Image: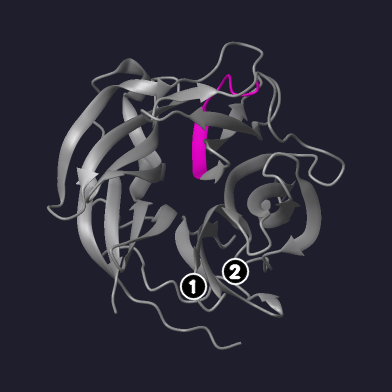
Amino acid sequence: MNIPKHSWAKKGRIFSPSGRHPKLATHAANPLPLLLSGDVYRIFFSGRDVNNRSSVGAFDFDLATGRIVEEHHEPFFSAGPPGSFFEDGVSIGNCYTVGDKTYMLFMGWQNPKDAHWRGDIGRLVVHEDLTLSLEREAAFISGDEFNSISLSYPWVQSNDSGGYEMWYGTTEAWDAGNGEMLHVIRHAGSADGHNWERTNKAVPYQLGAAQAFSRPTILRHKDGSQDMWFSYRAGDGTSYRIGHSRLSEDGWSMPPGDPGIDVSGEGWDNEMIEYPYVFEHRGTCYMLYNGNEYGKTGIGLAELKK
């Protein structure tokens, strides 16, 4: 399958966590931009406390000037109380709108003392002032007979028929036989954005090449084609990289494809790059992403070369 070449120009690291709040002491993972006005975006992220429990922080960033307008030092949403489905952290996916309401989806972490960590999908309400609140105490989407181990970072978008598509991560095995988990990206559909039905669509994987996926982000083009970027580990001992797949009538192409972006030769993203978020602004396509140590070194910005 012919996949058009992409080439991303790295613009540098735009944010490093300041540690001014104990719930946002380290990390700025899973960047998620929402437009405030003009060229200024509020970029949400998942920061961590000293016990690695993640909460949602944010800063306001001007794409035109490349400067931070404001860093918000209080968390917008915090890890939950004991017994909740997000008691050990909140890792954000993306936002989508149904009617006059905007929602932010997230992975809720549970890390039981005598069992493997796992996740379910939760949903936050994004209010007009861009504050966040939990829609309901129970998980929005939890495991079932087809996704019985763990769920992760979802991406939701509307489709041409008036419904919605979701691409989400699901664990098939904690160890696929090569010391690496098998965590794949599967699909669900919804007519109303609230009730979801799993389908048999999935991004193909290959053991030893691309088998531990996370954080899909999709760019839809005017001709109906779609490009997906995501984090993946190959299963050969290498750390996270960003991969790419393209949707055609035959389904998603075999990843990791050529994402047009890789680790740097030195610096804050020379060991790994992960958790991409791709978006368009004033005719230009941008990517937010994380570098070394799962977002501990901050957030970078890249621009798609035309």
Characterize the local packing of mark 1: few (<14), some (14-19) or many (20 or more) Cα atoms within 10 angstroms.
few
Q: In the image, what residue type sits under mark 1?
A: His
Q: Looking at the rendering, which quadrant does residue 285 occupy?
A: bottom left
Query: Is 232 drawn above or below residue 44 in the view shown?
Result: below
Q: Is residue 247 visible?
A: yes
Q: Which mark is residue 209?
A: 2
- According to the image, what is the colour scheme of the structure? one colour
Front residue (pair 139, 46):
139
Name of the residue lying farthest toward the right: 145
Q: Where is residue 264 in the image (x, y as percent from the top left)?
A: 27, 63
Q: What stretch is highlighted in magenta?
A: 85-95
Label 2 neighbourhood size at 10 Å, few (<14), some (14-19), many (20+)?
Answer: some
In the picture provided, is 151 more to the left or to the right than 274? Answer: right
Instruction: State the residue at coordinates (50%, 35%).
Output: 91
Q: Residue furthest top?
A: 82
Q: Residue at x 40, y 25 (%)?
A: 131
Query: In this rendering, is residue 241 above or below 28?
Result: below
- Residue at image point 70% right, 21% down: 114
Marker disc for residue 221: 1
- Between 65 and 92, the residue placed more toward the observer is 65
Task: Give the image location of residue 219, x and y in percent.
Answer: 48, 65
